[in-house]
Image (tube, rainbow, N blue to C red):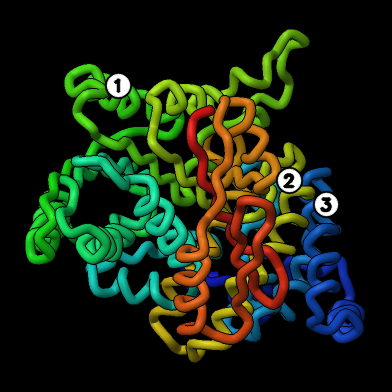
Amino acid sequence: MNNQSPITVPRRRPWPGLFASSSSSSSKALGTWLGEDANCMERLLVHCANAIESNDATLAQQILWVLNNIATPDGDSNQRLASAFLRALVTRAANIGSCKILAAITTAATSSLTTHSFSLMDLATFVDLTPWYRFGFTTANAAILDAIEGYSAVHVVDFSLMHCMQIPTLIDAIATRFEFPPLLKLTTVVVKHAPPLLELSYEELGAKLVNFARSKNVRMEFRFVESCYTDGFSNLIQEIRVQNLIYGPESKEALILNCHMMLHYIPEETLNPNPSPNFDMSSSTRSMFLKEIRSLEPAIVILVDEEADFTASKMVSRLRSAFNYLWIPYDSMDSILPRNSKQREWYEAGICRKIENVIAEEGIERVERLEPKTRWVQRMLNSKFRGVGFGDDAVSEVKTMLDEHAAGWGLKKEDDHLLLTWKGHDVVFATAWVPC
C-alpha cells in the first residue's frame, strides 16, 4: 500500500492477500470472460454498488478486484470511465462506513484529486478543446444580442463557473453589431473553491475585461459578488433587486441572466428524500430561485446545462445515469488528445470529480444534481416564463463553431431549444426565456 499512487487507482491488484477467500484463477477467468466491454463494466459497477450499499464486504471486494484489473486509469475511454467509477465507489464505501474492511484500506488509494489552477491562457485553451462549453457561450451570445436591441445599457449577470470565458466574444459581438454600443455592466457570480480554479484574482480579471472592452470602443463596468448556491444565491438576488430600485425602468437597462451550467448546483426536491405529506414541490430552493429571478423582470434568461439526470435518491440509479452520460467526454477526448497530454489530464480530472460527487456524496455535499431539459422547461413554465426560439443567426454561429471540432459533434433543434450532440447522443441543451 505504501508504494501505490496517492491519486490514481493502480492497474494491478493493489491489496495483496485481501481477497484470500476468492480464487485468483477464477477471478482472472471472470475478468477475461467479461472483457473490457462498456456494458459488462457497467454491470460490474452496478453489482459492486449494490454490494456496498448492502454492506456485503466479501462480494464488493471480489468485484472490485476484477474491476481493478480491467478498468485501468490510462487505458481506452471505456477503461478510464470505469476506473473513475471504481474510485468513486471505493470512496463511497469509506465515506458511509459500509464494508469496514474496504473503508480501512482506501485512504491512500482515494486521496483527493489534484485540482489544477489555470492561467487565463490555459483556461481558454481548456474551453476550446471541445464544444462542451463553447456551445452554451455561442447560443447565449446570439440570444443576448437579439434581446438588447434598443437598450442604452445592458446588465449581464453571469451564473457560470468558467470565469467569464464567454465575455470577450460577447464584447466583440456587441462592438460589431452596434454602431453605438450600449454600456455593458457585468456582474459575475463567484463560488469559492469551485473548480476550475483560476490563478488570477477577480480584480485582475475584471481589469483585463474592461481594458479589452475599451479597445473595442465598448464602455464596460465590472463587479463580482461572492454568493452561495445552497441558498439560491439569495444575497446576489437581493443586490440586483436593490439596483433595480435605484435605477428604475426609466434607465432603459436590459437585465440579462446568463445561467451556464451552474443552476444544477442549487438544491432541489431530492435533497429532502422524506418530505412531509404537505410538502410543496414548488417550495424547493431551485424553484424559489426561479421565482425570484422572474420577479426581477429580466429582458431574457438563458439557461444552458448538461442533458442528464443525476437526481435519483438511490445511488445505484445515479450510477447508471452517470455511466451512460459521462462516457461522452472520455470518448471525445480520444479523438483529439494523446494519452500523455496535460490538457487531457486536467479535463478528465474534472470528470472524475463529478463522478465522485454523484456517487460518493450525499446531502448538501452532493452538488452535481443535473436535471434533464424537460424538467427545466417545466420549472421555467411554472415560474411564469415562456420560451423564445433561437434565430437563424444563432444556429449558423453554432454550426460554424462545430466545424472547428471533431466530426462527431452535431446540433439538434427541439421546439424552441437547441441541443449539442456527440455521435447522435444529447450532451448539452440551450434554452432562452422571457417573462410571460
Task: Give the tally of numbered discs.
Answer: 3
Q: CA distance from mark 2 to mark 1?
A: 39 Å
* Inter-mark Cα distance, 2 to 3: 12 Å
Q: Give above or below for 376 relative to 356.
A: above
Residue at the top extreme?
278
Q: Nearer the viewer, residue 338 or 259?
A: 259
In terms of secondary structure, where does tag 3 sit? helix
Q: CA distance from mark 3 to mark 1?
A: 50 Å
Q: Quadrant of the C terminus?
A: top right
Q: Which of the two discs, 3 and 1, sits closer to the camera? A: 1
Mark 2 vs 1, N-terminal side: 1
Residue drawn at x 18%, y 23% as measured from the top left: 247
User: Residue beneath label 3, please?
Assistant: 51
Residue 172 visible? The answer is yes
In the picture of the structure, the residue carrying the numbered disc 1 is 241
Residue 204 image-quadrant placement: bottom left
Residue found 24% across the figure and 34% down from its top: 253
Which badge, 2 or 3, comes first in the chain's sequence? 3
| Residue type, numbered disc 1 | Arg
How would you rate the neighbour count of disc 3 (Cα within 10 Å): few for under 14, some for 14-19, many for 20 or more?
A: some
Residue kind at label 3, given as amino acid type? Ala
- Where does the image place residue 100, in percent across and percent down from the top left? 70, 47
Residue 363, by quadrant, is top right
Left or right: where does residue 112 sit relative to residue 179? Answer: right
> Quick check: can you spot residue 4?
no
Residue under label 2:
315
